[in-house]
Image (cartoon, rainbow, N blue to C red):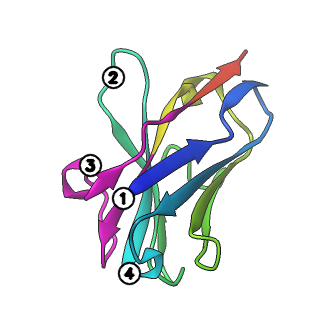
């Protein structure tokens, strides 16, 4: 059974940092691109960041570019999202997702999803 388990969410002040982790089991981790999405109340789920199988390619939403960094450790079957300079508008449930093979940025292209972790940024 494929499982994706996010952790690291919480409450942080604007300007602060958090690192999210997503531990993956039940698949060959290095065969899958990894994504982060987020969903704020009343908004559609939006793409945040993605990383290719061996970290050659990364891509980011314009809203987080320069502030967030996605990375992965294939030996640990874990993908990370380092979030710096957090803003109140970053408040959302953050979801880890995975897709077989190549990077995609649409939620409809994801094969598996985690259940999310809440990030709240206070002003």
Which x, y percent locates residue 121?
A: 68, 23
Magenta region includes residue 97: yes
Q: What element carries label 3?
A: helix
Foreground tag (3 vs 2): 3
Q: Distance between the residues labelled 1 and 3?
A: 17 Å
Please give the name of the residue rendered at 80% of the width and 34% of the height, measured from the top-left corner: 16
**Numbered disc total:** 4
Q: Earlier in the sequence, mark 4 or mark 3?
A: 4
Foreground tag (1 vs 3): 1
Please give the name of the residue rendered at 69% of the width and 35% of the height, measured from the top-left corner: 86
Q: Which of marks 1 and 3 is nearer the N terminus?
A: 1
Which x, y percent locates residue 101?
A: 30, 79
19 relative position to 38: left or right: right
In the rendered image, the vertical position of residue 24 relative to residue 85, given as above or below = below
Q: Mark 3 points at which residue?
A: 107
The span shown in magenta is 96-117
Q: Mark 2 points at which residue?
A: 43
Foreground tag (4 vs 3): 4
Q: Name the residue under label 1.
A: 2
Q: Distance between the residues labelled 4 and 3?
A: 18 Å
The image's mark for residue 31 is: 4
Please give the name of the residue rendered at 79% of the width and 32% of the height, measured from the top-left corner: 15
Q: Earlier in the sequence, mark 2 or mark 4?
A: 4
Which x, y percent locates residue 67?
A: 66, 50
Which quadrant of the figure contains the C terminus?
top right
Q: How far apart are marks 2 and 4 (CA)?
A: 31 Å
């Amino acid at each position: 059974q494929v499982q994706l388990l996010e952790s690291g969410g919480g409450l942080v002040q604007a300007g602060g940092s958090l690192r999210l982790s997503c531990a993956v089991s039940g698949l060959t981790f290095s065969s899958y691109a990894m994504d982060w999405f987020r969903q704020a109340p009343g908004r559609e789920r939006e793409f945040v960041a993605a990383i290719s199988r061996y970290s050659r390619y990364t891509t980011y939403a314009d809203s987080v570019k320069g502030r967030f960094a996605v990375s992965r450790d294939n030996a640990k079957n874990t993908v990370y999202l380092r979030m710096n300079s957090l803003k109140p508008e970053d408040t959302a449930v953050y979801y880890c997702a995975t897709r077989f093979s190549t990077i995609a940025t649409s939620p409809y292209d994801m094969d598996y999803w985690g259940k999310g972790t809440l990030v709240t940024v206070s002003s």
